[in-house]
Image: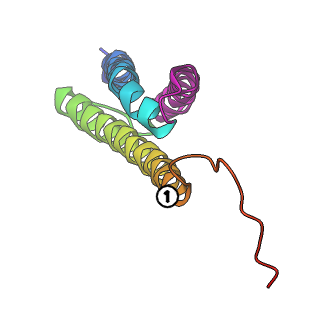
Amino acid sequence: MDYTVISYAAYLPIATGVTVWVARTLSRNGRIFLADVFAGDERLADAVNHLLVVGFYLINLGFVALWMRTDEQVDDVRGVFDALSYKLGTVLLLLGVMHLGNVYVLNRIRRRSALDKQHRPPVAPQAWVRPNQG
């Protein structure tokens, strides 16, 4: 029995499933946050949300595929669990770092938008006054 193949067979569906679950969760719950970031523009928020999800899948599933390979021979059941814990732990850390990076960037955009709102007058000017030439 080749335990290396067993570790691959367990790693790939688990890592892919976790990636899909995280992407769907972030997409569903991040939509509200994106709508706030983009000042209620729902179409823009949906478009950015979709682009973020596509990028998330490409980066993470690419990493999952590259990280599947192991140079060490897995000789027993304990080795399978060792390999899985190391590989899945790394994938989970990458998912967390990507999530925090997205939240950081979007929060900066949101803050900038809030600052822009503070510097605009609440209503447009309705008239102007001629300067005193006195």
Which residues are drawn in magenta?
39-68
Closer to us: 53 or 118: 118
Determine crowd level at label 1: few under 14, some 14-19, many 20+ residues with C-alpha closer than 10 A: few
> Residue at the spot x=52%, y=36% of the render?
38
Outermost residue toward the front in this view: 134
> Residue at the spot x=51%, y=51% of the render?
117
> Residue at the spot x=37%, y=19% of the render?
24
Name the quadrant containing residue 79. Answer: top left
Give percent across and percent down for residue 111: 45, 54
Q: Is residue 40 magenta?
A: yes
- What kind of element bears circle 1? helix
Q: Does residue 44 sit above or below 73 in this rendering?
A: above
Give percent across and percent down for residue 123: 55, 46
User: Would you say 67 lies left or right of 88 here?
Assistant: right
- Please name the predominant secondary structure of the magenta segment in the image: helix
The reply to whether residue 86 is in sight is yes
Image quarter of the N terminus? top left
Image quarter of the C terminus? bottom right
Q: Which residue is mark 1?
A: 115
Q: Does residue 86 sit above or below 20 in this rendering?
A: below
User: Count the marks: how many?
Assistant: 1
Give percent across and percent down for residue 72: 40, 39
Amino acid type at circle 1 is Leu
